Amino acid sequence: MNPFLISVYKEPSFFCNREKETKKCINAVSNQRNLVIYAIRRMGKTGLIHHVFYQLQKSNNFNLFYIDIDQTNNLNDFLNTLINGLIKGQKKSVYGKLIDFIKQLRPTITFDPNTGYPEIKLNTNNAQDSKASIESVLNYLESLDKPVIIAIDEFQRITDYPEKRVEAFLRSHIQHLNNVTFIFSGSKSSLLQAMFSNYNRPFYQSAELMHMERLHPETYCDFIMNHFSNSGKTIHKSTVELGINWADNHTFYVQYLFNTIWGNGIEEINTTVLQELQSEIIESRSALYANYRNLLTHKQFRLLKGIAMEGAVEKPNSNQFIQKYNLGSASTVNSALKTLRAKELIYSEDGCIKLYDVFQSKWFQQT
């Protein structure tokens, strides 16, 4: 099995470090303190949550639930995602009770032919019905015999729902739960921080905040080299360091790069092999990235390219940067920046603007 996973969590041996973050998460939720985990996309938040759940599962002292609400658009979507998230992968003792409870809400139930798991759908008529059903689910979780820990990924999504005062509604019910602890996570860091740090927001100071940094390069390097060594493959430390740096030490892109290298069948990997496979990765995405010319205006595309070429830009409004990439006026740049942020193509880190997609940035540089 390829040890460099790029999708689902398997077990600790395939998970790199995060010992400090894991201990903090376990300590918080074991002592009924809500926690917020925030970082840019694909930095490993979801993997960390599943790693924490893997550790907590050993004690058999908790009911653990994970839901991802990134694709939800309203409270009814939230409700259905919540219910389906509760029943997936649960033990029979919990599973049966959950199904009995859910049946009281009169859902439509179908079964996935591949997994055998039921697919639950509730069609509430209005926001009040959705809220009433969500409240019923939370009250049910409160009544379970073991403490409940529920992780809600991309939690900031609720701020986009059309219903009014969603934050206030959820906070008003969550604050009264004694048997349920929450892990809230998200990739829109500034928005998620604002939800829990601003005095005038309902979730103000209701959870501890934890920012996920990049893994230490030395730690990541050791992890990668150990897996190559255990597989009977040879790779030099300098080659691994070059790969980590090329992928901006961004978890997903590092994992993808070394997943590709490990899986190519070559037993001894040197810098030449590394460079060839890096080029192959970029080339395989060429048509996708080239299509952004049609999805963006000319100035937006040029700005995206300019940021990619620089790697990171501290002052995109500077005359030097604007003139170098022929971006027009500062107001045009500001407008383009707003659009690229909204499309989640760029983000800010340590006072600089970078492309979210490391491979896209390398594509610009390579072409």
Image (cartoon, rainbow, N blue to C red):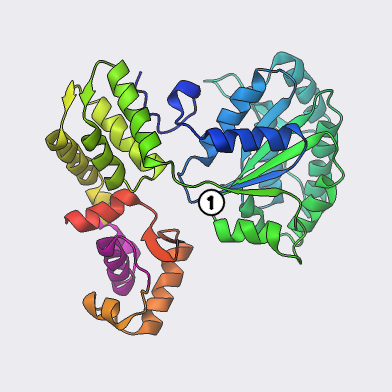
Is residue 266 visible from the viewing direction of this image?
no
> In which image quadrant can residue 147 be found?
top right
In the rendered structure, does residue 313 fall within the stretch colored magenta?
Answer: yes
Residue lying at the far front of the rendered structure: 218
Q: Is residue 188 left or right of residue 264?
A: right
Region in magenta = 290-314
Q: Which quadrant of the structure image shows residue 257?
A: top left
Q: Residue furthest left?
A: 272
* Residue 138 seen in the current view: yes
Provide the secondary structure element on which disc 1 rests.
loop
The quarter holding residue 144 reads: top right
On the rendered image, what quadrant is the C terminus found in?
bottom left
The vertical placement of 1 against 136, above or below, is above
Q: Is residue 36 above or below residue 355?
A: above
Estimate the x, y position of residue 59 in percent, counting from the top left: 70, 18
Residue at the spot of label 1: 187
Residue at 61% x, 53% y is: 157
Q: Main secondary structure of the magenta part?
A: helix
